[in-house]
Image (cartoon, rainbow, N blue to C red):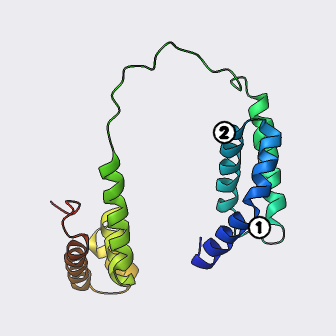
Amino acid sequence: MQPSQQHEFAAFVASRSDSLIRLAYVLTNDQHAAEDLLQTALMKTAGHWRRIRGNPEAYVRKVMYHEQVGRWRSPRWGRERVVHAPPEQLVEDRTREVEDRLTLRQALRALPVRKRAVLVLRYYEDLPESEVAKIMGCSVGTVRSQTHQAVARLRELVGDHHILEA
């Protein structure tokens, strides 16, 4: 989603969420389920925001209705299994991974477009240097130097984080 579309979507959510949560509550008859329903509908709406220009509220309402009907029809709807105590499972704390991803994402956005493109093509898409050079219309040497400079700049930007350690 483009930044202008993100702004439009955020403004829509801010202005219409009170009305939409009331509808969700009427559909679910439960505050928590209503919040889940609205969140699901807004997620689906955000994915199609470019197409929805005329009346986004009608689209969200329709998604909410269909989502709730699907929940009513589901054989699992309303059938929770009650247990005496939660299962004794240790869940690994992955907070550090999320923080690292956010830090890296922010650092990548700070790079110039060309350097960011080199890193994405080389390391995310796992393309060889020659293929990256063809795509970017430059020499293999330029790809190598841009990659080196981009990684060095990323290291400066992430600072104390261990993300870019070999």
Instruction: Label 2, secondary structure: give it.
Output: helix
Closest to the camera, between mark 1 and mark 2, is 2
* Disc 1 to disc 2, C-alpha distance: 27 Å
Q: Is residue 79 above or below residue 38?
A: above
Q: Nearer the viewer, residue 59 or 127?
A: 59
Which residue is depicted at the point 59% across and 17% down?
A: 81
* Residue at the disc numbered 2: 32
How many other residues sit within 10 Å of disc 2, few (<14), some (14-19) or many (≥20)? few
Q: Is residue 72 above or below residue 39?
A: above
Q: Is residue 87 above or below residue 105?
A: above
* Residue at the disc numbered 1: 52
Residue 153: image location, x then y, percent: 23, 78
Q: Are marks 1 and 2 in contact (CB under 8 Å)?
A: no
Residue 98 relative to residue 76: left or right: left
Residue 68: image location, x then y, percent: 77, 39
Q: Is residue 92 above or below residue 21?
A: above
